[in-house]
Image (cartoon, rainbow, N blue to C red):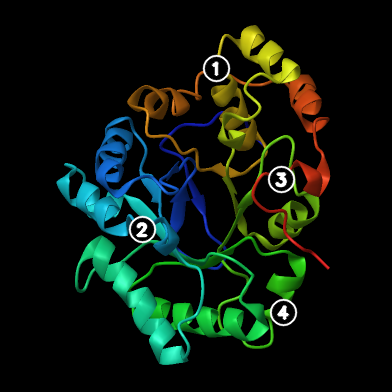
Amino acid sequence: MSNKFAITDLLPLPNSSVKIPRLGFGVYRSPAAQTKQSSLTALNAGYRHIDTAQFYANEKEVGEAIRESSLPRSQIFVTTKILTPAGSPEATYKKIVESVDKISGKGGYVDLFLIHSSSSGSSGRKEMWQALERLLEEGRTKSIGVSNFGVKHIEEMKPYAKVWPPHVNQIELHPWSQQRVIDAYCKKHGIIVEAYSPVVRNYKASDPTLVELAKKYNKSTQQILIRYALQKGWVPLPKTDSPEHIVSNADIFDFNITGEDISVLDGLDQGSAGAIVEAVENE
């Protein structure tokens, strides 16, 4: 894999004409009052990919930022997610349409809609996926995918899914939680792997190995971790409301971590014990 990346890079989704930006901006539980300004700062800094969710309670503010930016809608990739079904296929469908309307207005669209979690059981997962397929058919989302799904959850979809494999699987990924089984599975099937919590919420900012590498490359620990995610073939979604960090988190395209140092970071893996949010279940 070439390590010459640019913030403008786009990656093709499987069995789709849609392409996703290589770097995203997360707004995980960013306060609604703050979300619009942070999103505008990110768009001004060159990000073209914003990741929200129903659970974050800030979809409307992301939509406002998109409209207030000077960018054409076609140049911005926006993702949202549904956490749980709403009790019936029709109610679940309405719940996802409400998100699209909040972000992009009546008749608008989102670029990617994900099932946020595998926790609803097989019938709940199926109900949400079929609602997303309907949304895709109607053109109100350009692509559909999953989050926190292990191998068993994606395999389980095969009998009923009209769209398989899912276009994306968004999971927790960083050196301490590399989730190698699901990562390899997704890559084998062409599923784009998105990395949430790529900077581990700064919990590892004083890790000696990481600090040493940051000094070596004259970069922040966050920049090392985001660059690592890129070089692993993931789409990182760093989240911060600090304007300074929003800008610096995107300043990761002027250096390359050597293969030797990637191996050093690989060596930090703690398996499922290294996850701060969730390690997926594969079996």
Question: Disc 1 versus disc 3: distance between alpha carbons?
Answer: 22 Å
- Give the residue type that dot 3 points to: Ala
One can see residue 161 in this view: no
Q: Amino acid at mark 4?
A: Glu
Residue at figure coordinates x 33%, y 35% from the top left: 42
Q: Secondary structure at mark 3?
A: loop
Q: Amino acid at mark 2?
A: Ala
Return the mark for residue 12: none
Picture layout, residue 99 above or below residue 42:
below
Residue at 80%, 45% in the rendered image = 273
If you read the primary sequence from the N terminus, does the residue marked by circle 4 or circle 3 appear first?
Answer: 4
Gap between marks 3 and 2, in whole Å? 24 Å
Kindly identify the residue that appears in the image at 31 percent across and 37 percent down.
Answer: 38
For marks 1 and 3 on the same chain, the one whose residue lies earlier in the sequence: 1
Q: CA gap, disc 4 to disc 3?
A: 24 Å
Q: Which residue is mark 1?
A: 220
Mark 2 — residue? Answer: 57
What percent of the width, then of the height, locates residue 30? 38, 45
Label located before the other in sequence (2 or 4): 2
Q: Does residue 30 appear left or right of residue 259 in this picture?
A: left
Give the CA distance from mark 2 to mark 4: 30 Å
The percent position of residue 97, horizontal first and vertical second, equals: 32, 76
